[in-house]
Amino acid sequence: MPRTTRAAKTKSFLQVANWKMNKTIREAKQFIEQFVNEKVVTKQQIWFAVPFTDISPMKQLVGDVYQIGAQNMHEASSGAYTGEIAAEMLLEAGASFVILGHSERRKYFHETDSSINKKVLRAIEAGLKPIVCIGESFEEREEERTEEVLKNQLLEGLKDVSVNSISSCIIAYEPIWAIGTGKTATSDMVVKAHEAIRSIFEGLYEKKIAEEMTILYGGSVSPASAEELSKSPGVNGFLIGTASLDPATFAKIVTLSENTTVE
Ligand code: 13P
């Protein structure tokens, strides 16, 4: 059992929409128009991780109201890497953050903790906030190896990230079996995993850093699960796929997560 290191919910809840490979520029603009029409009143932060082509037009459209980010990047700052994109390009287009190590990147594009680590270090150096995704498979959970898997992913994925830089990183706990399946992890599972992650951070860095780390939950978050999960101790926000594609559904999740900012 991990030692209990819980974060006080003193900062605003963070909602990150991960659009994956969805929405053309036209569709992205339409989404924002409809989302604004939902008239959500919130103290939460709302970020959009969008396809590369949407970054610049989205930034021009939303300014500083929402943060815009990418879903991947290359670890080099430039060079002969046909089809890849560098941190500087994302920054100049208007991105302020980048999702790294998503399980779909690990599965379909063979990313490893070691290659993710290079990207994390590059993103930090360039001034992009990394959202580092970790999470266990169904088999690993069944074998009661969840904490071991999370620990290895953090140890390798965050290797050489200094104590001064770690505060610019965000962790997303996304159990693979919950992504796009409609199977949300229970509040109990999420709380335990987040506590385990904070304990690992306490071992790697220090207690204050562990407590202040922003840790998101992702995996089939929906209006049905948002309220309970957002109230779960140690959950600082969501990383949302499918349910973030529809403006009304996403707005509903934001509304259901309101009043969870302070514990
Ligand atoms: P779903 O919300 O569709 O399960 O996707 C979660 C996810 O992968 C967010 O990064």
Image (cartoon, helix red, strand yellow):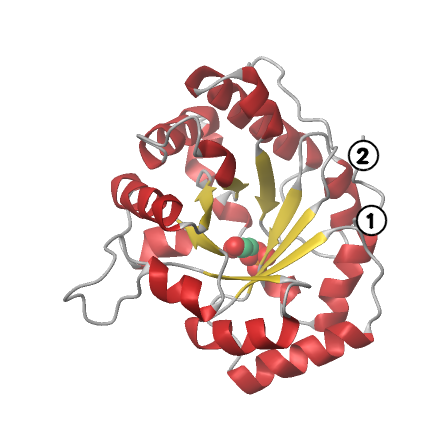
Q: Is residue 258 something that shows in the picture?
A: yes
Q: Is residue 235 above or below residue 34?
A: above
- Tally of marks: 2
Q: Is residue 190 left or right of residue 88?
A: right
Classify mark 1 as within 8 Å of ligand 1 or not, answering yes or no. Answer: no
- Amino acid type indicated by mark 1: Glu
Q: Position of residue 25 (x, y in %)?
A: 53, 83
**Residue displayed at 82% across by 52% down:** 256
Q: Is residue 183 something that shows in the picture?
A: no
Residue 12 placement: quadrant = top right
Residue projecting furthest to the bottom = 26
What residue did someone put label 1 on?
258
**Residue displayed at 62% across by 77% down:** 61
Q: Is residue 26 left or right of residue 115?
A: right
Residue 10 placement: quadrant = top right
What residue did someone put label 2 on?
262
> The residue tagged with tag 2: helix, strand or loop?
loop
> The residue tagged with tag 1: helix, strand or loop?
loop
